[in-house]
C-alpha cells in the first residue's frame, strides 16, 4: 500500500522522509519525527500510528533505531499486519515487516537511508527508490523527490498513486512538511508544492521564525540580505 524512505544527511545533520501510496493522506498516516528524535514511517494493512510515535520516544531516549523498532513491534499481537521503519539522529536505521504484509513487501537499508514498502508492483520498487536517493546529489528534498519518482517508475504501489508527502527536519532550519492528500498526480503536485515553498514570500518568512538552534529568532534579529535556497 505504501513506499516510504527515511534518510540522514551526514554533512548537514538534516533528516528527511518521503512517502507515496495508492490511498489517501499518506503524510498524516505514515511520516512522523523531529530533529531531536529522528524519523519514523509506520505503514501496512492495519498501520499503527502508535508505532510511529512510540519509536520516536524510544530514539529520543537514546535507543538506536534498530533496537527502538524491536522494542515497539515485539509486544504488538497485530504486528503481522504492520510495517515500521525508523532512522535516528545519528543516521542509524531499523525496520520491521510483518509476516502478513501484502506482497510485494519488504525493506532495504543503505548508508544513512532505509526504504520500506508493501503492496508493490515489483520488488525493484524498493531498490530503485533507495538507489536513486544514494545516487543523487543536492538538497535533501530534491534527493527524496528523485527517490519517489524512481520508485514510481519501477512500478510503485500496485494500485497506482493517490497521495504523497515529504518531511525534512533540522535543528537550524524550520521543518518542511508538505502533503498531497488526494491527487491524480501526487508526485507532480508534491514537486510543485516544494517549488512554491522555496519562493518568496514563504521562503523569506521561514528565515525569521524560531528554530531549535535559534529559539528566539524574530524579524528584527535576523540579517535581511538574500539567502540561498535552504539545504532542508
Image (cartoon, helix red, strand yellow):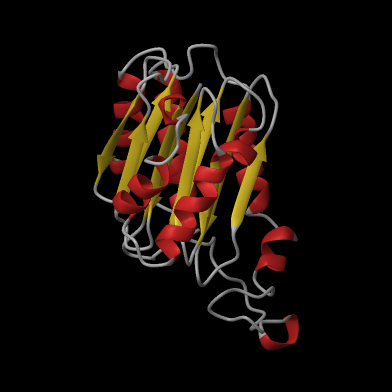
Residue lying at the far left in this picture: please name it. 111
In the displayed structure, would residue 197 be above or below residue 210? Answer: above
Toward which corner of the image does residue 202 lie, by quadrant?
bottom right
In the rendered image, the vertical position of residue 72 relative to residue 8, given as above or below: above
Q: Quadrant of residue 179?
A: top right
Residue 48 x %, y %: 54, 37
Residue 132 appears in the rendering: yes
Q: Residue at x 32, y 35 (%)?
A: 130
Residue 69, how many percent across, how many down? 37, 46
**Which residue appears at 41% of the width and 20% of the height?**
101
Residue nearer the viewer, 209 or 96? 96
Can you give x and y, in whole percent of width and height, for residue 156 in the image? 45, 19
Position of residue 126 in the picture relative to residue 220 (left or right): left
Place of residue 196 in the rendered image (x, y in percent of width and height, measured from the top left): 68, 47
Relative to 77, is 193 above or below? below
**Which residue is painted at 33% across and 64% down in the image?**
11
In the rendered image of this protein, does residue 232 appear above or below residue 4?
Answer: below
Whether residue 94 sits left or right of residue 47 in the image: it is left
Q: Is residue 218 left or right of residue 105?
A: right
Amino acid at each position: 500500500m505504501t513506499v516510504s524512505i527515511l534518510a540522514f544527511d551526514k554533512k548537514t545533520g538534516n533528516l528527511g522522509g518521503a512517502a507515496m501510496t495508492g490511498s489517501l493522506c499518506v503524510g498524516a498516516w505514515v511520516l512522523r519525527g523531529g530533529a531531536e528524535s529522528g524519523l519514523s514511517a509506520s505503514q501496512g494493512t492495519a498501520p499503527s500510528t502508535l508505532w510511529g510515535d512510540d519509536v520516536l520516544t524510544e530514539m529520543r531516549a537514546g535507543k538506536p533505531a534498530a533496537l527502538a523498532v524491536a522494542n515497539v513491534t515485539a509486544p504488538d499481537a497485530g504486528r503481522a499486519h504492520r510495517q515500521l521503519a525508523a532512522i535516528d539522529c545519528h543516521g542509524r536505521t531499523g525496520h520491521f515487516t510483518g509476516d502478513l504484509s501484502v506482497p510485494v513487501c519488504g525493506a532495504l537499508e543503505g548508508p544513512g537511508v532505509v526504504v520500506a514498502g508493501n503492496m508493490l508492483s515489483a520488488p525493484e520498487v524498493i531498490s530503485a527508490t533507495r538507489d536513486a536517493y544514494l545516487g543523487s546529489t543536492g538538497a535533501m528534498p530534491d534527493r527524496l523527490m528523485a527517490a519517489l519518482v524512481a520508485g514510481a517508475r519501477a512500478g510503485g504501489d500496485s494500485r497506482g498513486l493517490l497521495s504523497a508527502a515529504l518531511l525534512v527536519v533540522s535543528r537550524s532550519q524550520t521543518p518542511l512538511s508538505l502533503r498531497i492528500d488526494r491527487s491524480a498526480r501526487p508526485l507532480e503536485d508534491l514537486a510543485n508544492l516544494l517549488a512554491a515553498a522555496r519562493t518568496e514570500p514563504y521562503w523569506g518568512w521561514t528565515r525569521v521564525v524560531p528554530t531549535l538552534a535559534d529559539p528566539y529568532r524574530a524579524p528584527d534579529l535576523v540579517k535581511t540580505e538574500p539567502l540561498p535556497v535552504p539545504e532542508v
